[in-house]
Structure formats: structure tokens, C-alpha cells
Image (tube, helix red, strand yellow):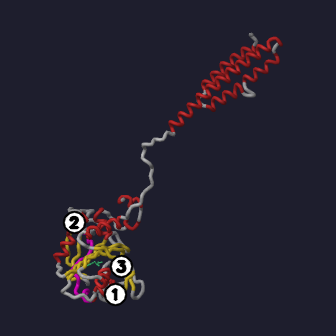
Amino acid sequence: MSNPASAQLDQLKTQAQQAFEKAQNLQDLYNAKVQYLGKTGAVTDVMKAMATLPKEEKPQFGKKVNEVKEFLEKLYAELELNLKNQEIHSKMENERLDLTLPGSGSILGSLHPVQKVTDEIVQIMARLGYSLRTGPLIEKDYYNFEALNIPQDHPARDMQDTFFVDQTHVLRTHTSPIQIHSLENEKLPLRIIGTGAVFRCDSDISHLPHFHQIEALCVDEKISMADLKGTIAFFVREFFGPGLKTRFRPSFFPFTEPSAEVDCSCPVCKGSGCALCKNSGWIEIGGSGLVNPRVFENAKIEYPKWQGFAFGFGIERMAIIKYGIEDIRLLPENDLRFLRQFS
Ligand code: PHE
């Protein structure tokens, strides 16, 4: 058979076969199928030529068209299957689960550095036989000041330092009132530590208006400055490690006599002077001293039968020294980028 329609059909067959085999994906393959075998496709068009053929050539031509269609449909089915398999295969490759990868997990919360430091201090002092006490944040004037021998005209009562709740109540300015509650209510001898929040009208890179203190009180029959120094030296060394220097500076507190302030060498500048230690090379962590007989008298405790020492340290101060934090105000800010460094 050598009519032009038949030759065209041969040509189409080759073209379609090439187009099918060239298809890189199912969409291309389908497009090629529509182009050649679709309702308005090239092969369908050629069939229309049938009408113009002499009658005797029609059956043979029809047969040939069917053969070409069958051939192309079979080829299409094979290629379609291949491409489908390929697509599934590459999808599986791409979405492959690596069960050995670490999971994304959920972020666990952690203790705030102030709480961590508090817990650590409580544990160190527990080893020396001290047990934990707390007290109210709003104190009567009597417990925050009067019983501690802080007279009416003492500057600590000034509006600039103390938040007054009303005429007779204050937000406690220190944890020392816990000493009085224990002296009034507990049996002697006594070794207690008190912790918690305290409040003062004060704020800069080393002062916060709301901070935390740790208070220790030891009452026994014979207590001297040596006991105080020994206890603080042990406590500070256990807490900071052996690398840090401490010093006692003579000072004054109405509720202790004699009194000393305790300083630690500055962890940021190592003593050469910086903004944190106000160029002194030292950072004050708190006060200490032997319990003033007037405090015993107020609590109706016999002196000198009973004697004692006490100290009160700022927990945020201890935290910035331990971790080398340059601005104390980072602690209450609760920026997670900062806090996560301690988890
Ligand atoms: N309460 C004092 C303060 O807040 C510290 C202190 C406690 C001093 C116990 C002596 C004894 O500054």
C-alpha cells in the first residue's frame, strides 16, 4: 500500500513513538498521547483520510490504522507504568524517613538561675545543720525594723529605700525579720536559713528594686566572730569554688555588733576595675555580724547565756558573681535567650 495517507501514517507512528519515549514525566507522556491519539489528534486526523480512499484500499488502511493505534497504546501503557514506578520511587527516596535522626523534641523548662542559686545555697548550709525558714513579704514595721533595733529615724526607713504598704506595714526590705520570727517561736540552740524576695526603691546595674536574699542565723551558748568567719568562708568556698577571693570589711548594722560586710573579688574584671564593681575590684555580697544584745532583749532571750551570729547575702549578687553576668538586670528580665544558658 503506497497511498499518501499510508505513508503519513508511518511517519506519524515514528513521530509518536519518539514523542512518547522522550517524555520525562507522566504529564509530558499524557500530552503526547493527546497530541497523537486524542479526539483531535494527528492519528485521528489521518483516519479521516479514509473517506477519500478507493473502496478496495479501505479495509487494509483501516487495519493499518488500528495496528498503529494498538502499537502506540501499548507503548503508552508500558511507558506510563515505567514513569509511575519512577515517580513513586523518587518520591520514596525524597520522603525517606531516617529513623536514626534525633527527634525535634519539646523544649523543657528549667529552673531560673536565682532559684538554682537559692537551692544550691540551701543545700550547702544544710550540710552545716541549717534548716530552711520563710516569712511574709509584707511585714509589720516591728519585724522589719523595730525588733531589729532599727530606730525610727534610721535612713533604711526613708521613703527612698522602703516601699510602705501603709503606716505600719512595709514590703520587707531584707530577710532579717525571719530571724525575729524564729527567735520568738523556736527552741534554742538554733541554726536556720531564710530565703525569699525583698524590696527596695533602688535600681541600677548592680541594684534591683525586687531581689532575693539568703539569711542565716546561728544561736548557741558560745558564739564568736571566729564562728561567723569560719561559716562564711566555708559557705563561700563551697558555692563559688576556690578561685574567688573574699574579704570582711568592718561595717555597721543596728542588729549586729560587731558587724562586717562581705565582698567577693569581681568575676568580670578579676580585680582590675570595671563598671560592675564600680572600679573597686570587689563586689559586696551582703552583711554579717554577731547578734546585737538588743535584738535578743526584744525577743526576750537571755544574753550572754545565748549568743549568735547572722548574715544576709543578695542571691542575685551571688548569681552574677558565680556566672560572670555583667548586668544584674538581666536576671529578672526573663529573656529566654539569656535563661537557656543556665538550663
Ligand atoms: N539585713 C542586712 C541587709 O539587708 C544584711 C545582714 C543580715 C547584716 C544579717 C547582718 C546580719 O543589708
Quarter residue 67 falls in:
top right
Give, as a three-letter code, the residue at label 1: Tyr
Q: Left of 42 or right of it: where is 336?
A: left
Q: Left of 87 or right of it: where is 125?
A: left
Mark number, residue 135? 3
Which comes before the other along the chain, label 2 or label 1? 1
In the foreground, 5 or 106: 106
Asked if residue 295 lies in the magenta stretch, the reply is yes
Mark 1 and ligand 1: say if the CB distance to the nearest ligand atom is below 8 Å. Answer: no
| Whole-number angstrom distance, CA of label 2 to CA of label 3 | 27 Å
Residue 115 pos. (x, y %)? 35, 67
Mark 3, other Cα within 10 Å: few <14 / some 14–19 / many ≥20: some
Find disc 2 in the rendering and name its residue.
237
Residue 105 pos. (x, y %)? 44, 52
Residue 275 in view here: no
Q: Of tags 2 and 3, which is closer to the observer? A: 3
Q: Left of 13 or right of it: where is 113?
A: left
Circle 2: element type? helix
Give, as a three-letter code, the residue at label 2: Arg
Mark 1, other Cα within 10 Å: few <14 / some 14–19 / many ≥20: some
Up/down of 50 relative to 228, above or below: above
- Magenta region: 282-297
